[in-house]
Every structure is written in structure tokens, then in C-alpha cells.
């Protein structure tokens, strides 16, 4: 019997929204519904797959040039520009859909379109992870960090959705009291390392890249 080909990872984006207003760093997480096939009943950062229309969605401000430079690494040349733009849009679209938060300028548009023009300019690209083979779903996820004050977001405005439940702000440097998948913890640890090196999270720093090698998750840098 022919062995099925491994699933090809699809592009996805996730946002680590950081609140630094209380002299500490807190990040927004929510619990995935038990109805999800991929990673049900665990806490994650808002995010999801890049939809086809994300690459064509207009924005109020593009990604920072330094973020683009890092995103270009190990990105297929034939899809580069569409992928980069679409990843930034996907990150903020998912944040809006899953947590009710809007980053950008409100607009009145046609049904089905985003009710705002995403502002991608403050997204810091700091981590990337590819789901290992053998999973029911595989994603090539780019993780972006975003400060609430830079995005003019009120942390108390985050609201549960049918996709993310029990939204909460967790202190990055305290012991976790929520159930997370190992890769989510690794990305959170990466954010902690970046903040310890420079709390401002400057654009263009090296990006952690987690992927599978001979059955083990390895960390490289971009």
C-alpha cells in the first residue's frame, strides 16, 4: 500500500499582544474550543491560517521594512510579496475575529470585507514554527509581537469569541497556570528572551525558527 504524502504546511500568522502598562509584561491568550480538530482545549495566542483574500486586502500602513527583510528569508520567491502582506493582514484579522480587537482605521465596506484597514507597521516578526509531519493539520506560522500602547488598544476591550474562550492576560515572567502546547510555550519563552535582551523589541533582530529534524524540534535563527 502506498504511503500517503505528508501534508504540506499552510501559511498562518499569530499575534502575541503585549500589555506593558502595569510595569510588567502580560500577553493575551485564549482557550481553543473543543470542537477544533487541531490543538483543541489548549490556550494559544490569537491567530490562524492566511486566507487567499488576505493578500489583496488594503491596509492603512504596511509592514516595517526590517520585518519584511526577515520574513523574506526562506520564503518561496514566487509568493513572496503576496505572502508577506497576507501574513500581516491575517495576524490582525484573526485578532479581530477571535478577540474583538481592531488594529487600524475603521471603514464602511462591502459585506464580508474587514471593517477596518489593518495597520501592520508595529508588528515585530520574532518567531516562526512549522508543525511536524504526522499531525492532522500542518501550519507554517509566523509569530508577531505587538504592544497594546503602540496599537492604541485598551487591554480590557478583549472579548471572548466562538473560536477563543476564556481570554486572559498572563504575566510573561510568572509561572504558567494554563494548559499550553509545547510549541506555544517555546514561542513564549522566545518572547521572554527577546524582552530581556531589549524591552523595546527593536525591529530587525534575529528570528527564532522552530522546525522538525529527524523527529526532533530544533531551533535555528533567521
Image (cartoon, grey):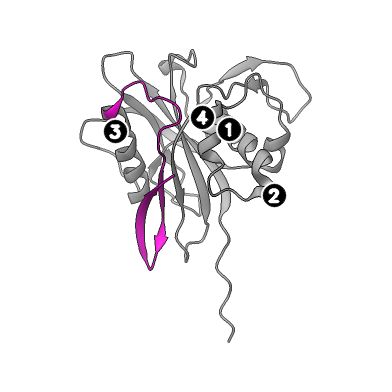
Give the residue furthest to the left: 175
What is the C-alpha distance between the residues marked 3 and 4?
Answer: 21 Å
Q: Which image quadrant: the N terminus?
A: bottom right
What is the C-alpha distance between the residues marked 1 and 2?
Answer: 18 Å
The residue that mark 1 highlights is: 88
Residue 163, percent from left and from top: 51, 38
What is the C-alpha distance between the residues marked 3 and 2?
Answer: 34 Å
Residue 220, percent from left and from top: 38, 50
Q: Earlier in the sequence, mark 1 or mark 3?
A: 1
Q: Are there few (<14), some (14-19), or many (20+) residues within 10 Å of tag 4?
A: some
Asked if labels 1 and 4 touch by Cβ distance under 8 angstroms, the answer is no
The residue that mark 4 highlights is: 66
User: In the rendered view, does 7 fall on the left or right side of 38?
Assistant: right
**In the rendered image of this protein, does residue 128 appear above or below residue 89?**
below
What is the C-alpha distance between the residues marked 1 and 3?
Answer: 22 Å
Q: Which residues are magenta?
A: 197-222
Q: Which image quadrant: the C terminus?
A: top left
| Residue found 65% across the figure and 48% down from its top | 77
SS under mark 1: helix
The residue that mark 3 highlights is: 192
Mark 3 or 4: the one toward you: 4
Amino acid at each position: 500500500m502506498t504511503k500517503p504524502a505528508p501534508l504540506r504546511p499552510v501559511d498562518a500568522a499569530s499575534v502575541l499582544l503585549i500589555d506593558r502598562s502595569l510595569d510588567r509584561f502580560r500577553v493575551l491568550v485564549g482557550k481553543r474550543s473543543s470542537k477544533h480538530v487541531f490543538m483543541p482545549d489548549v490556550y494559544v495566542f490569537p491567530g490562524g491560517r492566511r486566507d487567499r483574500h488576505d493578500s489583496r486586502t488594503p491596509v492603512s500602513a504596511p509592514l516595517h521594512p526590517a520585518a519584511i527583510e526577515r520574513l523574506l528569508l526562506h520564503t518561496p520567491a514566487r509568493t513572496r510579496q503576496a505572502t508577506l502582506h497576507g501574513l500581516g493582514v491575517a495576524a490582525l484579522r484573526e485578532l479581530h475575529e477571535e478577540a474583538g480587537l481592531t488594529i487600524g482605521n475603521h471603514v464602511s465596506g462591502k459585506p464580508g470585507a474587514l471593517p477596518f484597514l489593518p495597520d501592520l507597521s508595529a508588528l515585530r516578526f520574532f518567531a516562526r514554527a512549522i508543525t511536524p509531519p504526522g499531525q492532522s493539520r500542518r501550519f507554517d506560522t509566523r509569530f508577531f509581537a505587538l504592544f497594546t500602547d503602540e496599537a492604541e488598544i485598551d487591554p480590557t476591550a478583549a472579548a471572548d469569541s466562538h473560536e477563543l474562550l476564556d481570554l486572559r492576560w498572563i504575566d510573561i515572567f510568572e509561572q504558567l497556570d494554563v494548559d499550553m502546547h509545547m510549541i506555544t510555550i517555546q514561542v513564549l519563552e522566545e518572547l521572554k528572551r527577546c524582552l530581556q535582551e531589549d524591552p523595546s523589541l527593536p525591529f530587525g533582530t534575529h528570528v527564532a525558527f522552530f522546525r522538525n529534524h529527524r523527529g526532533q524540534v530544533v531551533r535555528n535563527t533567521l
